[in-house]
Image (spheres, helix red, strand yellow):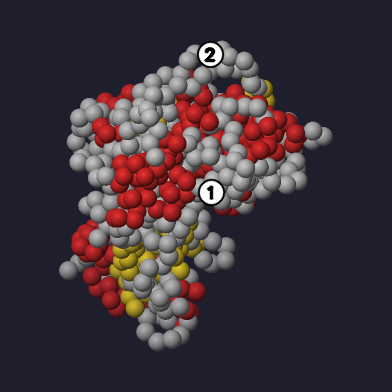
Amino acid sequence: MARDERVVAGRYRLRQRLGSGGGGDVWLAEDEALRVQVAVKEIDVPPEPDAAGGDPAARGRKEALKAAQLREHLNVITVYDVVEDDDRPWIVMEYLPGTRDLRAVVAERGSLPSGEVAGIGAAALDALCAGHRLGIIHRDVKPSNILLAPDRSGTADRRVLLTDYGISLWPRETRVTQSGMVVGTPGFVAPERLSGGEATAATDLFSLGVTLYFAVEGTAPFERDTLDASLMAALTTDPDVPQRASDPLSRVVMGLLAKDPAERMQPEQARELLAEATEATTRGASSATLPGLGGARVPAATPGGADIAEGGSGNGSSGSEVSAGGAGHGSVSDGPEPERTQGSGEPAGADRSDGPVGSEAAADSGGAGTARSTPGGARRVPGRLTVALLTLAAVLVGGGGFALGAVTYHDEGATPRSPEARAKIAATASPTPSPTVTRSAYPYGRQAGLRDGLTPGQCVDADWKDGEYKGRPSLKLVDCHDDEPEGQVIATVAADGTASASGAEAARSECTRRTAELRKTMAAPVLYVLTPETGQSEPPASACLVFLKNATLGGPIGAYRKSGDEVYVTQLGTGDCFDAEEDEDGSYTKTLASCNEPHHAQVVGWAWASGNGSSDSVDSSELCDEKYGVNWARGAGHEMWAWTPADEDWETGFRHVLCAVSREDEKKLPAGALKPAY
C-alpha cells in the first residue's frame, strides 16, 4: 500500500504529508469513523530505550496525554486522540486549513506591526503559562512553532496557536550530567540551558522574547553566520533594543531576554505590558481584533498569578537542534486563574516608539526581571554565568569548535573566587565530558540557504551557481502542486553521527539505489544528493533530490502523486496510467489514474525527437508508433498516442515525447496493466 494510503489504528487514513516537527512527521488524514479531516503526527521513537527515560514509546504516550490536557485552551493546537500503531504513538490533532507559521508570515510580510506582535505574544504567553501550571515545559518556542490560522469567518492569520507542545521523546533528564542533552533551536535557547542548566518555565520565556524580537524586527537578536557565533551571542551579547517596537512591547522583549533567569521578567508583568501594547494600538480603531490575531486572548494581570517554579516535561525540537543539558521535573503553583480579555488592534504601523528604549527605561517599570544597568550602559552578566562563559571560551579556543559542557553551580554560601581562579577551574578538562553536539545554522551550508533538514516529499527550486547540476545550489522550498517545482526530495539517508567525506559517498550510493526504479520511468532524470555541511556531530539527513534535465517537474512525481491529481507530461513515466479529457481549445487535461481501474491511457515509454524544430513540426505519433507500436498496439484494437511537453521545456532542450497506448475507439482501457506482445 502506498504511504499516503496507510490507515493508522484502523481509523485514520493518511492522505498527504504536511511537514515535520517536534520529533516526527505530520500528515493530513481522514478520520474514517467521523468523516472529518485531522492532522496526525507520527512520533519518531528512538530505536533503543534509554536508561534515564525508560521506554520511549511509553514516554511518547505520556507526553501526548499531557498535551491533551491543554485541548480546551484557545491558543494551543487541540489533541483529539492518542493511538498506537506500528509500535509507536501517534497524536491526532485538529487540522486547520490555511494555517501558516510565524516565520513564514514574517518572510512574506517583513517585520510585523508592534501591536500585532504584542497580541501574538499575549496569546503565546497565555498558552505557555497554561502548560507551566501542568508542569509542562515547551523547550522549543520559536517562530515556526507559533501558528497563525484563519478565524471562523475565514479571515487569514487571525487565530494564534502554539504547536509541538509536550510530545517530545527526548530524555527527560533531571541534571545536565545525567545525559548531557539539551533540546532547542540555535539562537532561541536560553543561556542557562546552553551552560548546562535545567529546562524551566523561565527558559520558555526567554525563547518567547527572542520570538517576539524576531517578529517585530524581522531578524532574530542572536542570529549569526555560524552556529558557534549564534550560541556565543546568546550567552554573552546583549541584543540591541528593538527599534520597531512600541515602548511597552520593547520593555517586555528586553525583560524576557535577561541572561539570568532570576532577573527575567515574570509572566504577570509581561501580561500587563502586552495588554498595554495592544490597547495602545486600538485606541480610535474600529476593529475589535488585531490584524492577524482574531480572538487571541490578552490576559489582564492579577495579583496572585501563578508563580513559576523549575521543572516540567520537555518537548522535542524541529529543525535545527542543539543538544547539551537536561530537562528538569517540577511544578508550577496553582495560583488563581488570571482574568482574560479579548485583544484588540489597529492598522499596521501604529504606535511605534519615538526612539530606542534602553535598559534604564526597562528598570523604571518596577517589575521583576528587568535589566540592571551599569554606568557605561552595559548589562551586568550574572556571576554564576561567568563560569559557563569561560568554559565555553576555553573550548572554542582550544578545540576550534563548539562543545556544550556540564557546569555544576555551588553558589549558596560559597566564597567568591577570583577571575583567575574561575578561569583555571573552567579550563580544567572534565574526566567525563558531556557529548559535543553541534549543528550549523545552515545545516547544508550557507550557499544552500536552508535552515532545516529536508524531508521526503518536499519540493524545491534550485539556483545553480556553478552551472546546471554542478556544485551546491541555492535551494528554495516551494509548494509541490501550486509552484511547478524544479525538483523533489524522493528519499533521505540518515547521517552516521558525523558529516564527513565518507558519509557523503555512502549517501550518494544509497540515494542512487533508492531512486533507481523511479529514474527508470523518467526521460532525463538528474539525481542530486544534498549532503550536510561537514563538521556537524548532529547533521541532518542527506537528501536524494531528483530533477529533470532541461525541464521542470511541474509537480510531484513517483509515490508523491495520488489518483485524481492533474498531471503534466513531465510528471508521468513508464507504467503510469491516466485519464485525458479534451478541453475547448483542443488541449487535454490529464489526471493520474490507478491502473487497477478503467483508464484512458497507459504510458509505455519515451521517444526522442532529433533536430531543432518546434514540437508542432515533429510527427510525434510516428515516433511512438515506430518505437513501441509493434509491441503494444498492432492488431489488438489499440493505438499509440504521443504527448509532448510544454513549449518552454521543448525549447530549452527537453525534446522527449511521452508514448502511451490507448483504445482506437477512444473509450477507456479495462482495469489491469497492459503487457507488450513480445
Q: Which quadrant is the N terminus positioned in?
A: top left
Residue at image position (48%, 82%) is 614
Residue at image position (55%, 35%) is 256
Residue at image position (60%, 39%) is 373
Using the image as rendered, state which of residue 65 and residue 420 is in the foreground: 420
Work out whether mark 1 precedes mark 2 in sequence or the reverse, and give the earlier one. Answer: 1
Residue 179: image x %, image y %?
Answer: 26, 35
Residue 335, which numbered label?
2
Count the labels in the image.
2
Residue 269: image x %, image y %?
Answer: 62, 26
Amino acid type at mark 1: Ala
- Judge from the rendering whether residue 569 lies leftward or rightward of residue 210; answer left or right: left
Q: Residue furthest right?
A: 284
Residue 180: image x %, image y %?
Answer: 28, 38
73 to 536, vertically: above or below: above
What's the distance in space between the residues labelled 1 and 2, CA to CA? 33 Å
Residue 73, which numbered label?
none
Q: Which residue is mark 1?
A: 220
